[in-house]
Image: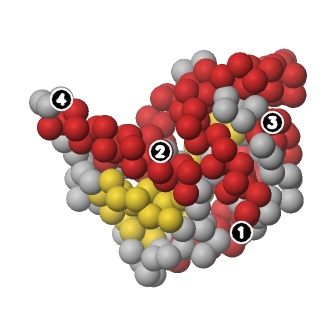
Amino acid sequence: MSRAGLDKKPDQVAAMFDQVARRYDVTNAVLSAGLDRTWRTATARALALAPGLRVLDVAAGTATSSRAFAAAGADVVACDFSLGMLAQARRRLTDATARAGAGAGTGGGRVLLAAGDGLSLPFADGSFDRVTISFGLRNVAEVDVCLAELLRVTRPGGVLAVCEFSRPVWRPVRTAYMEYLMRALPAVARAVSSSPDSYVYLAESIRAWPGQAALAETIRAAGWTRVGWRNLSGGIVAVHRAVRPGGDD
């Protein structure tokens, strides 16, 4: 087992996510005390989804968020550079299709899987109405390049939503949260994760990540407009929303 470093070399990050893929969703649910569902709902709301919209979900992992977006009727491309994550996503999509065939029924749009790197997305300019990345921007080696690539593949007037760990706004919560990250999170991960050392990286990368205002400025510098954010769970997570200039949205 190995873990990535904060230099975020792509091959190390991809290998790390390959290792955690099998129990990734279970581990996230445990570590977030179930709040991950609330965060996905808030991200979908920020995207203002509607039937027929084309959505790119970068760093989609097991496509949990992608399936939630598709439930609103959007057609979603779930893109990730971890083949292990995409393999798990395919299994889950196959299971969902089997359940629907048995009468469960999910409705909504389609989810297509694609292997791709956020620093060089394999899509044409202006291909998508909505682009999003949840808990993945923090893991790319060049954040500004990734944001520029997301801008490139979005149509004028299209919307970006970035859901990412952030800085709790209330100091006592922030102090307790950082203590949890560096002490409790690795311990919990040892009990539920298939690669607990990877969650040491997770804790370190969250601690090193900029706060809400700094990330908003980085998004704006990449060419996005109307940048704002909404704090979730007291600022433990924030959803940043922005618009590609040139449209009427």
Identify the residue shown where x is 24% and y is 51%.
109
Q: Is residue 166 left or right of residue 21?
A: right
Numbered disc in front, either 2 or 4: 2
For marks 3 and 1, the one nearer the N-term is 1
Identify the residue shown where x is 47% and y is 50%.
87
Disc 2 element: helix
| Contact, mark 2 vs mark 4 (Cβ under 8 Å) | no
The residues tagged by marks 2 and 4 sit, at their Cα atoms, a distance apart of: 21 Å
Q: Which residue is mark 1?
A: 144
Q: Which residue is mark 4?
A: 104
Q: Give x and y (percent) for residue 56.
A: 44, 61
Numbered disc in front, either 1 or 4: 4
Q: Amino acid at mark 3?
A: Asp
Number of callouts in the render? 4
The residues tagged by marks 3 and 1 sit, at their Cα atoms, a distance apart of: 28 Å
For marks 2 and 4, the one nearer the N-term is 2
Q: Which residue is mark 2?
A: 88
Numbered disc in front, either 1 or 2: 2
User: Callout 2: few (<14), some (14-19), or many (20+) C-alpha neighbours within 10 Å?
Assistant: many
The residues tagged by marks 1 and 4 sit, at their Cα atoms, a distance apart of: 42 Å
For marks 3 and 4, the one nearer the N-term is 4
